[in-house]
Image: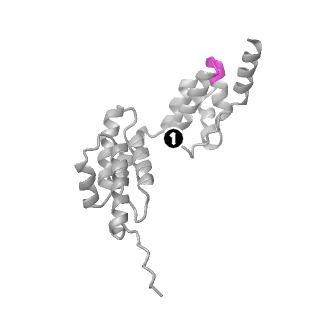
């Protein structure tokens, strides 16, 4: 049993929390921080010191404002105010509404971008609402009325279902008329 515990402790000691400098997603950083703090069973003091140690650059300047009586809650509140998405949700909603598929952009990339924008535009909303908004935004972003109609005819329940149907439709169309969605069919070679 001691061997198992020492192996578990060794794995824990290899884990390292990434640094945060304000240029990447705050919510991603906080999710990783919370997950690691829970896994490592950090108490409030551990959480405070590890969080302080992770902050760099302009994000680290928050420590000046927190002062000596700082807490994890105060630091996170300041981080959310300065770097969070909550105050920017309207901007992300506008980006989501304006998002259209670029020429030759893979459907998977469109799906990933739509999913990210929905998460940023609707922080804290239910998964059901976010999935509905994502599905509608994905269909609108396709920018091809024929493809949109074919996907809608299949009545996808989720954005992932819509992606799967759209991908199949494009694959089928690629075999019969690949010029339709921006792909060029190779020219047949002349017989000799």
Q: Nearer the viewer, residue 132 or 66?
A: 132
**Residue 42 in the image, given as x and y percentages of width and height:** 64, 19
Residue 69 seen in render: no
Write the residue at 32% across / 49% down. Answer: 137
Quarter where residue 121 is shown = top left
Membership of 78 in magenta stretch = no
Q: Residue drawn at (35%, 31%), measured in percent from left and top?
A: 126
Seen from the viewer's position, the closer of residues 66 and 59 is 59
Task: Specify the quadrant that holds the N terminus.
Answer: top right
Secondary structure of the residue carrying tag 1 is helix
Q: Position of residue 48 (x, y in %)?
A: 63, 24
Which residue is rendered at x = 50% and y = 36% of the image? 27
Q: Is 100 left or right of 57, judged from the image as shown?
A: left
* Front residue of this view, candidates 192 and 76: 192
From this viewpoint, is residue 171 visible?
yes
Q: Which residues are magenta?
A: 40-47
């Amino acid at each position: 049993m001691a061997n198992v515990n020492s192996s578990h402790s060794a794995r824990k000691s290899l884990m390292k929390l990434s640094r945060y400098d304000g240029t990447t997603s705050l919510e991603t950083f906080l999710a990783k921080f919370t997950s690691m703090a829970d896994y490592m069973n950090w108490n409030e003091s551990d959480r405070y010191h590890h969080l302080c140690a992770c902050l760099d650059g302009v994000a680290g300047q928050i420590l000046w404002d927190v002062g000596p009586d700082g807490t994890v809650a105060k630091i996170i509140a300041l981080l959310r105010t300065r770097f969070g998405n909550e105050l920017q949700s309207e901007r992300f909603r506008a980006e989501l509404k304006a998002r259209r598929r670029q020429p030759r952009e893979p459907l998977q990339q469109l799906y990933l971008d739509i999913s990210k924008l929905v998460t940023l535009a609707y922080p804290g909303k239910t998964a059901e609402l976010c999935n509905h908004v994502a599905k509608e935004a994905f269909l609108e972003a396709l920018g091809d009325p024929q493809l949109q109609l074919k996907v809608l005819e299949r009545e996808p329940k989720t954005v992932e279902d819509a992606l799967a149907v759209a991908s199949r439709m494009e694959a089928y169309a690629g075999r019969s008329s690949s010029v339709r969605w921006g792909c060029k069919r190779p020219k047949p070679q002349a017989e000799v």
